[in-house]
Amino acid sequence: MSDAKTKSQRKERFTTLSGLPIDRLYTEENLAAWNPDEALGYPGVYPFTRGIYPTMYRGRFWTMRQYAGFGTAVESNQRYRYLLGKGQAGLSVAFDLPTQIGLDSDHPLALGEVGKVGVAIDSLEDMETLFEGIPLEKVSTSMTINATAAILLCLYVAVAKRQGASLPRLSGTIQNDVLKEYIARGTYIYPVRPAMRIVTDIFAWCRDHLPKWNTISISGYHIREAGSTAVQEVAFTLADGIAYVQAALDAGLGVDEFAPQLSFFFNAHNDLLEEIAKYRAARRLWAGIMAERFGAKDPRSLALRFHSQTAGSSLIAKQPLVNVIRVTIQALASVLGGTQSLHTNGYDEALSLPTERAARIALRTQQIVAHESGAADTVDPFAGSYFIEALTAEVEQRAQELIDKIDEMGGSVEAIGFMKGEIEESAWGYQERYRTGQDIVVGVNKYVTEGLEVPDILKVDQASEDAQVQRLRRFKSDRDGELVQRRLDELRAAAGGEENLLPRIREALRDRASIGEVCGAMRDVFGEYRPEF
């Protein structure tokens, strides 16, 4: 490029949000080796680049979920009913930190955290209250829970059965992705190997009892939130997926028995076109992995189904209402990229859990994209774009190179330290570009206003935590203590052997053991994870 042309541009070097170089212009020369029959195909068929269903949103819209949960089960139940009444199509449950790491609300380490970042669930009684008046057979429920996923799934099934629901008709998802906890998030409990055993026990149990349930949501979302690039998000997420598939095969499951119930969870960030390319590349990569590496035959095993959520890390506190625009762009990227399910963040989430007003606007954002933007009226509208196809191929190639490197290390379980280090380095790079002004963030390093615009925010007060602790104490006092201990001993024995743990977990919860007690029994056998780096 000539000096004159360079000087006429806004900056010397253009890149995507993840740092991939962007040319001034894209032409057919950028797709010289591109074969549309191989790279694209048609929606609903291999390699699924254009989407996993033939008609996509012309058939029906994506599932509109709003991630919600705070305080006690009573308070969260009220929010769920509110959202369903405003047109939400599915529930997405946020749990508090003690629930996520298997501690009861009365545990000393739970002090100050009960109900703060999600709903506190200690028992079957809490789970019944959480879904009171909500017919689980008719509502799809996603639960963002990992280390304690088996326990929360068993509680959900118990509530559904008490409602008289048919288990084969239950639909929903548990995140159940423990590997990304060690890599990027930190709400782990057990060492990696026993944690992977619980994951595959869930696969096996759901294969036999919950055929419509997504047994795992393999998550790139938290990897991206921790600071990864789009390429790393795809590579590390699919590498984790490979590890789960291999673990299930090693446990004796047939690939087409469990693979149709796998799902994924990706971030929706600010770079509209990079995000669209990212989703398309991920679908194409996964189809190839399942067909060529694992020999899957069922088309459902090859199709990467994913939920997406707008980027919490992109939200700013100083001008919170401006976040509505960010969330809109991110939601549009998800839809143009072919998501199956979407959560849009509230504009106030850099300050607190979303208020009802913020949650309603976030839901309305999805509804406007669906009904007013035209983005849902044709399948994969960017297909054939010189830039999008070139970028899709670049994301795919670079992600494959990272997957190959992880394979050389022995897979995701052995490469946890490598992935963690790569994410940390990328996160530092992002911060440096913002600090030096190479990347502009409106309201942070440019167009800054004085003072802090603080809207009304949601506060979970101490009374809510006190009420939950008292509720748990009443629950523990009103039960057969000897029976509970017998069930926990049976669970310990099962954990020390090879049988599927879910039936033992279900029995313990049915006979009124708490989540903390069930986790404690397995901790006694498995121990706890201690990072080595």
Image: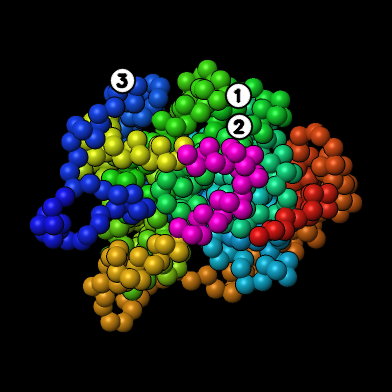
Q: Secondary structure at mark 1?
A: helix
User: Which numbered marker is on residue 245?
Assistant: 2
- Residue for badge 3: 37
Mark 1 vs 3, N-terminal side: 3
Q: Is residue 406 magenta?
A: yes
- State if disc 2 and disc 1 touch (CB < 8 Å): yes
Q: At 80% from the left edge and 33% from the top edge, which residue is drawn?
A: 499
Residues rendered magenta in the picture: 401-426
User: Which numbered marker is on residue 255?
Assistant: 1
Residue 15: percent from left, percent from top = 29, 53
Query: For the residues marked 3 and 2, what is the alpha-carbon distance in whole angstroms?
Result: 28 Å
Q: What amino acid does circle 2 point to?
A: Val
Number of numbered discs on residues: 3
Q: Is residue 440 above or below residue 47?
A: below
Mark 3 vs 2, N-terminal side: 3
Q: What amino acid does circle 1 point to?
A: Val
Q: At 34% from the left edge and 26% from the top edge, which residue is drawn?
A: 39
Main secondary-structure element of the magenta-colored stretch? helix
Residue found at the very far front of the displayed protein:
2
